[in-house]
Image (cartoon, rainbow, N blue to C red):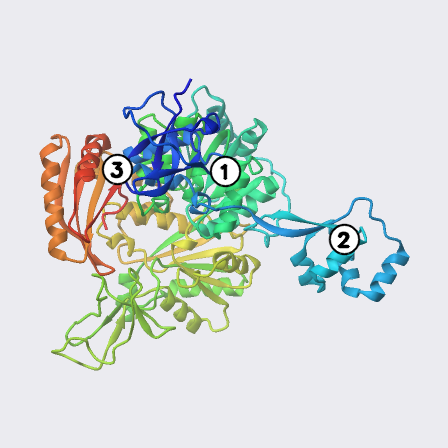
Amino acid sequence: MSAGIARIITDLALDREFDYRIPEEWRGKICIGSVVRIPFGRRRARGFVTALPERSAYPELKSIEGLVDVPPLFDAAMLRLARWMADYYAAPFEQAIAALLPAAVRREGAKHKEQRVARRAEGARPTKVDEAVLAKRSPKQAAAWALLTQRGECTAAALEAETGVTLAGLRSLEKKGWLVLEKGVIRRNPHDRMTVLPTVAPPLMAEQASALAAVREEMTAAKPGVVLLHGVTGSGKTEVYLAAIQSALEAGQGAIALVPEISLTPQAMERFRGRFGETVAVLHSHLSDGERHDEWKRIAEGRARVVVGARSALFAPVRPLGLVVVDEEHEPAYKQDESPRYNARDVAVMRGRLEGCAVVLGSATPSLESYHNVRLGKYRLVRMLDRVDRRLMPAVRVVDMRVETEKAGVPHLLSQDLIEAIRLRLDRAEQTLLFLNRRGYATTVMCPLCGHVETCPNCSVKMTYHKNAEQMLCHICGEVRAVPARCGNPACGAPNIKMSGVGTQRVEAAVRKIFPRARVERMDSDTTGAKDAHAEILGRFRRGDMDILVGTQMIAKGLDFPNVTLVGVVLADLSLQMPDFRAAERTFQLLTQVAGRAGRGDVPGEVLVQTYAPFHPAVQSSRNADFDTFFDQEIELRRELGYPPFTRLATVLFRGKEEQAVDACSREVAEKLKAVLPETVRLTGPAPAPLAKAKGFHRAQFMLRSAAARDYVPKLRELLKTCKPPKGVTIAVNVDALSLM
C-alpha cells in the first residue's frame, strides 16, 4: 500500500523531481501521468506525476494542492521512454516530458471546443401543411429545418451561415418541438476539406508479399524486432505498410506511421484514410493548437487507431501499440533541432523495444547507420528490388557540365540535353520535375572589380538575391536588405554589382523564358509558407494543371505522380560541397530519391543529372541506384576516419552575443570535461563552429567521439548541471549529430 507520496516533475527547467504528499481525498485517483498543482517555494506550479514511491528521503513533505481534472497524459511506458531520451540525449528530464506532449495538450486550460448544436427532435413529424405555413411566414426557419432534416444534426453557426436563420429563429423551432438545441463538442478536423474515397487493398506482388510476411513474423514474435525494408523507389513499400497496419488493427492493436516532411503528409493521409477511414489521425506542426488537441484526444480515447505524421507523431498515445513505421528512415528531418535533440528513427526503435512492438524502417536509400545494423545482425533486412507491375527503373544520364561550358564558352544553367528532354515532354503532354536544393535567384551579390561579397550582418553567410521582391535575404536569420546600387566596400564603391550563383527562383525564370507557353510553378520554403500550401501545389501538379515543377528537396522524396516522365537535377554538386562527413551520403540519397520520382506510371522515365563532378562515387552509384557499391566504399572511409556508424558523435555548441565570453566558456567546459573523460573518448576543439555567427550570435563548439555515447554523456550531463555559463551564453548538446554545421 502506498504511503501516499507522489514524485513530481515541474514545468520549470530544473532537471529534478520532487516528492509531495497526496491528500487523503485524492489517494487512488492520482497515478503516473496525472497533472497536479503544487506549492513551489513562494509560488504555485504545475507538475506531472512520475512515480508513486513507498517512502521519501525527506521527512517533511508539502501536500499536493489540486488535481487537474484531466485523464493522465502519459503512462509508465512513455515515462520510461522519456527517461531514456533525457539520459541518452543529455537533456533535462522535464524537456523530455514536454517532447511527449503537444503544447496544445500540456497547456493548462486546454479543452475541446464547444458549440451550440441543433438536432432534429425525436418524434418530430411536422405535416406538409405545417411546413408550408413555416415557409410562408419564416423562409429562413424553413430553410434551416430542411437542411436539418437532410443532415440530422448541424451547428447553429453553420445553419446561420447557410440559411441566414438566427438563434431566436432556432429557439422558435425548438418551442414547436421540431428540434433540440444543446451544447456539443465540435471536432476541429484538420482534414475536413479533404475528400477521400474508400480504397481496396490491391493484390500484392511477390516481393511485397514476402516483405509483408517478414514484417508479420516480427509483429507476432515473442520479442518483436526491427525490419529494414530496402525497396527501390516505386516498389510499393507503402502497400506493405498498409497491409501490416491492417494486421495490427485486426489483432486489436494500433499503429504509428511517420513521414519525414509535412509536405508528404497530405498524400500519406489520402492513402491511409482511403484504407482505414476515420480511424486515422494526423499529427504535425502545421496543425492549429485546436486541431492538434482534438487529434491527440481522439488517439488517447481510442477513437483513432492509426496515426500519421511527422516526427512528433511518434509520441502519440496509441494503446496497445502493435507497429511503428518510419518511412524514408534516412531523412535528416527526423532529427529534432531543439532539446532534447532526438532522432525520431532511433527513438522509434527504442519505443518498439520498450513496448514490445515491431518497427519497420523503410527507404530506397537507407542510412549507413541502419544498414550497418543489418550487417551486425541487429536489424532484419528485407529487399524489394522491382517496381510495381514490373515498371522499369528510369534511365539515368549524367551530363558533364564541364563539357557543356567548354562548348558554349560560358556556363549555362540548363544543358542542351535537358532543354531538348523538357521540350519532348511538353510535346507529349507529360510532366517534368526540376530539382535544385537551393532557393532564391542568385546565391551571391558581389562586386566584379574588387570581389566584395554582400554578407549578412548577423550571420557568417552570404546574402541571397530574390528577384521577385528585388531584395537580398539571409536564409539563416531572415534579414532582408535592399540590393545596393554600389559596391559595399568603402575602398571601391563601384556601381556594377553582379548577381552570381543559382537558386530555384532563377531556374524557374530560365525555364519560363525558354518555354513561355509551359505552365511552370516553384515549390520551396518561399512558396509554401502558408497553411496547406504544400497540398495545394501538389494537388495542382497531380491534376495536371502544370507542366513543370521546380523545387528543392521537398520534391525529392515520397511523391508519386504517374505522369512525371522526366526529372532534371540542375546541379548535383551542391551537397557534395558541404563541409560535412555525410556530404557523399546525402548526395547519393538525394540523387537516387529524386530520380525515383520519374517513370512511376505506364510511360518509362528518364533522369538527367547535371554535374561538374561526373565521376564522383555518389554520382556514379546513383545512376543505377547501386546502394551496395556506394555503402561498401563509404563505410570503409568512415571506418578509417573514425566517424559514425563506428563512433557515437556529439557536438557541444556554445552561443552568445559576446565572442570572447563564448570562446572562454567553450574552453573552460572542454578542459573540465577532458579531466574526467575516459581515454576511449576523443574530444576535438573547441573552435569556431563552421557557421561561426548566426542570427547575431557567435558560435563555438567541440566534438566528442567514442564507440558508445554512454562513455561521455553521463559525465557531460553531470558537468552541465553544475556549470554556470557567463550571462548570455547558452550551451546545446547534440548527441548523434547529423551535421557539423
Residue tagged 3: 90
The residues tagged by marks 3 and 2 sit, at their Cα atoms, a distance apart of 61 Å
Q: Is residue 179 left or right of residue 594?
A: right
Against 698, residue 355 (above or below) is above
Upstream in the sequence, badge 1 or badge 3? 1
Examine the image and state in which quarter residue 161 appears: bottom right
Q: Residue furthest bottom?
A: 495
Amino acid, disc 3: Ala
Find residue 16 and report its horizontal and vertical position in percent: 28, 35
Contact check, label 3 and label 2, Cβ < 8 Å: no
The residues tagged by marks 1 and 3 sit, at their Cα atoms, a distance apart of 30 Å
Q: Which mark is residue 174?
A: 2
How many circles with numbers are drawn on the protein?
3
Q: Which mark is residue 70?
A: 1
Contact check, label 1 and label 3, Cβ < 8 Å: no
Against 737, residue 565 (above or below) is below
Work out whether residue 651 or residue 524 is closer to the camera in this orientation and state it.
651
Amino acid, disc 1: Val
Label 3 element class: loop
Against 413, residue 324 (above or below) is above
Label 1 element class: loop
The residues tagged by marks 2 and 1 sit, at their Cα atoms, a distance apart of 34 Å
Residue at image location 51% in from the left, 40% down from the top: 307
Upstream in the sequence, badge 3 or badge 2? 3
Q: Which mark is residue 496?
A: none
